[in-house]
Image: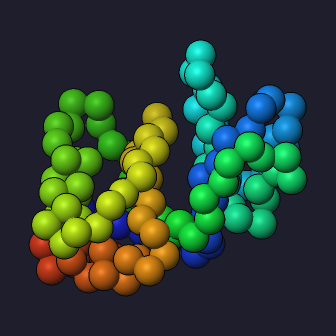
């Protein structure tokens, strides 16, 4: 399996309204529940009005489109990272999974995954 590094820094934050989010940006993830509206975006695209924010994330995605019948992909990646004491924040889209780690653990995470047989591009 090939993991593709994302070339930008990311922020995880909370906003009070989806109206605070610019939907014209290249990449972002929105999660809305009855308790909160969460946003993952490029750090430079973080809305000025956030109630909480956590900067300093880097990410990679599983390259290609994943079939819904595939089982255990995220659990295998998270197991490798857990063995190396690296926390993660995962986001899934229809096509694939995105894994975020804190910037200070990014190289360590990629190295551990590469040693476990993952290709890195």
80 with respect to 21 (left or right): left
| Observer able to see residue 22 | yes
User: Looking at the image, which residue sits at the far front?
Assistant: 51
61 and 20: which one is in front? 20
Residue drawn 48% across the image and 65% down it: 59
Write down the quadrant of residue 95 in the picture.
Answer: top left
39 with respect to 24 (left or right): left
- Give the answer, above or below, for where 98 lies relative to 93: below
Residue drawn 85% across the image and 38% down it: 20
68 and 43: which one is in front? 43
109 and 55: which one is in front? 55
Instruction: Look at the image and tell me in which quarter the N terminus lies.
Output: bottom left
| Observer able to see residue 95 | no
- Give the answer, above or below, for where 104 lies relative to 15: below
Number of numbered tags placed on the structure image: 0
- Give the answer, above or below, for where 86 lies relative to 111: above
Question: Residue 56 placed where, x, y %?
Answer: 57, 70
Instruction: Look at the image and tell me in which quarter the C terminus lies.
Output: bottom left
Residue drawn 44% across the image and 60% down it: 100
Question: Residue 28 placed where, x, y %?
Answer: 66, 48
16 with respect to 5 (left or right): right
Question: Residue 106 placed where, x, y %?
Answer: 40, 77
Residue drawn 16% across the image and 57% down it: 79
Question: Residue 65 placed where, x, y %?
Answer: 39, 46
């Amino acid at each position: 399996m090939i993991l593709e590094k994302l070339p930008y820094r990311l922020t995880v934050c909370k906003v009070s309204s989806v109206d605070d989010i610019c939907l014209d940006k290249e990449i972002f993830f929105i999660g809305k529940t009855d308790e909160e509206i969460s946003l993952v975006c490029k750090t430079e695209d973080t809305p000025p009005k956030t109630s909480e924010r956590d900067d300093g994330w880097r990410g990679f995605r599983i390259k290609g489109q994943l079939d819904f019948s595939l089982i255990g992909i995220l659990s295998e990646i998270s197991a490798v990272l857990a063995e190396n004491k690296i926390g993660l924040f995962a986001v899934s889209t229809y096509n694939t999974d995105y894994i975020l780690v804190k910037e200070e653990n990014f190289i360590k995470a990629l190295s551990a995954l590469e040693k476990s047989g993952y290709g890195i591009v």
